[in-house]
Amino acid sequence: MSVYAVYDTSSGEILRMMDVDPADISLQVGAGENYLSATSETDVTHYVSLGPDTLTAKTAQSITWDTLSITSNGTDTATATGIINPSTATIKYYTDDVEDSSDDISEVSITDGTLSITSIVVGTSEIYIDAGLIYLEYQQDITVT
């Protein structure tokens, strides 16, 4: 058995990881897909750079927050800078009275390299920033008191 990354030949996005017999891997790829030998973590940390097709490590985003804790008054703000443009931020809001269940999820497009978070509810905001195929997803928690 060997581990393979099956990827989209037009974008380089790794679609799935497979642990299969080398003789059977060609049977596991569909139209518009190809495969490379990989490790089990490759789908999260790498993409396929096309022409010639090679596994390439994703780049970490260098994001800076001015604070990681805000007051739940609707005006106190935590601001992130240095975000790759364009990006998408997914924000999951958790209140302290509900464990393991997000109360609300919002998605924000980022085009100017900054993101500001406010809240009127005590809890935690989990922020996930996706800057595209060649960047690692960034995650940060903001505490709301």
Image (cartoon, rainbow, N blue to C red):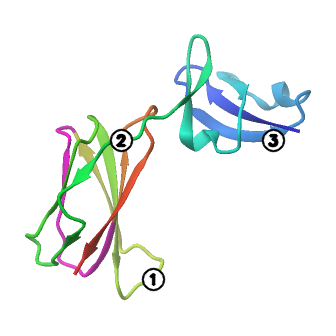
Q: Which mark is residue 99?
A: 1
Between the residue at mark 3 and the residue at mark 1, the CA separation in whole angstroms equals 35 Å
Q: Residue at x 48, y 34 (%)?
A: 58
Q: Which quadrant would residue 116 be assigned to in this image? A: bottom left
**93 in magenta:** no
Residue neighbourhood size for the residue with mark 1, other residues' Cα within 10 Å, grouped as few (<14), some (14–19), many (≥20): few
Q: Quadrant of the C terminus?
A: bottom left
Residue 26 lies, with reference to residue 50, above or below; the image says below
Q: From the image, tell me which residue sits under label 3.
A: 19
- Nearest to the observer: residue 64 or residue 2: 64
What residue sits right under mark 2 in the picture?
A: 61
Give the residues drawn in magenta, as a range. 111-125
Dot 2, crowdedness within 10 Å: few (<14), some or many (≥20)? some
Q: Is residue 124 magenta?
A: yes
The N terminus: image quadrant: top right
Which structural element holds mark 3?
strand
**Amino acid type of the residue tagged 3 in the rendering:** Asp
Q: Amino acid at mark 1?
A: Glu
Say which label, 3 or 1, has the lower sequence index. Answer: 3
| Image height of 27 relative to 64, above or below | above
- Residue 47 is marked as none
Residue 118 sits in quarter? bottom left
In the rendering, at what x and y percent does residue 34 appear?
Answer: 70, 23
Name which of mark 1 and mark 2 comes first in the sequence: 2
Q: Position of residue 123 (x, y in %)?
A: 30, 79
